[in-house]
Image: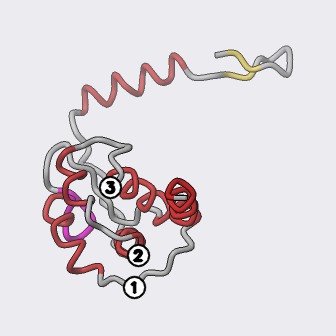
Amino acid sequence: MRAGKFAASAAALIAGTLSAYAEPSETLAPCLACHGATGQSEVENVPSLGAQMASYSVIQLFMFREKLRVAEPMNEPAKGLSDDELQSMADALAALPAPKPPAAGDPARLERARALTERNRCRASPTSARTTC
């Protein structure tokens, strides 16, 4: 019986059909400390979550809560969250602005990457309908 309830709950989360009753600001505050209050992380190796699709975020949060995805900084805080809180948090993350792209970076490295991409891109064959890579 418990496995059936678990499966039904997981299916509802994945489908994004749970209603959001929990206040996201209280439950989301610890997350935003690392992931960025404006949706853009300032911490190295911590992803920005602004404008992330709610359906994706709720699945990830569910996986952290159930320890199906193991990352200690995420598993412990997620373990006591209800399904409604997960959905509310995912909706709040989706409402944050998208992160800004990184600054241009090293021009020499970018040029090497451009040249490598040009050398290895797929091209249509002039003599047939085939594409060569």
Q: Determine crowd level at label 3: few under 14, some 14-19, many 20+ residues with C-alpha closer than 10 A.
A: many
The residue type indicated by label 2 comes to Asp
Chain part drawn in magenta: 35-41
Residue 87 image offset from top left, x and y in percent: 42, 71
Verify whether residue 124 appears in magenta.
no
The residue at which mark 1 appears reads as 21
Residue 26 image offset from top left, x and y in percent: 20, 79
Location of the N terminus by quadrant is: bottom right
21 vs 9: above or below: below
The residue type indicated by label 1 comes to Tyr
Which residue is depicted at the point 33% across and 27% down? 111
Between 10 and 54, the one lying in front of the other is 10
Question: Label 2's element?
Answer: helix
Distance of label 1 from label 3 (alpha carbons) = 18 Å
Between 3 and 132, the one lying in front of the other is 3
> Of all residues shown, which one is farthest toward the right?
128
Distance of label 2 from label 3 (alpha carbons) = 13 Å
The reply, left or right, for residue 37 in relation to residue 112 is left
The reply, left or right, for residue 35 in relation to residue 57 is left
Between 8 and 12, the one lying in front of the other is 8
Secondary structure mostly taken by the magenta-highlighted segment of the chain: loop
The label shown at residue 84 is 2
The reply, left or right, for residue 35 in relation to residue 97 is left
The residue at which mark 3 appears reads as 65
Q: Earlier in the sequence, mark 1 or mark 3?
A: 1
Distance of label 1 from label 2 (alpha carbons) = 6 Å
32 vs 68: above or below: below
The residue type indicated by label 3 comes to Arg
Which residue is depicted at the point 20% across and 60% down? 77
Scheme by which the image is coloured? secondary structure
Residue 130 in which image quadrant: top right
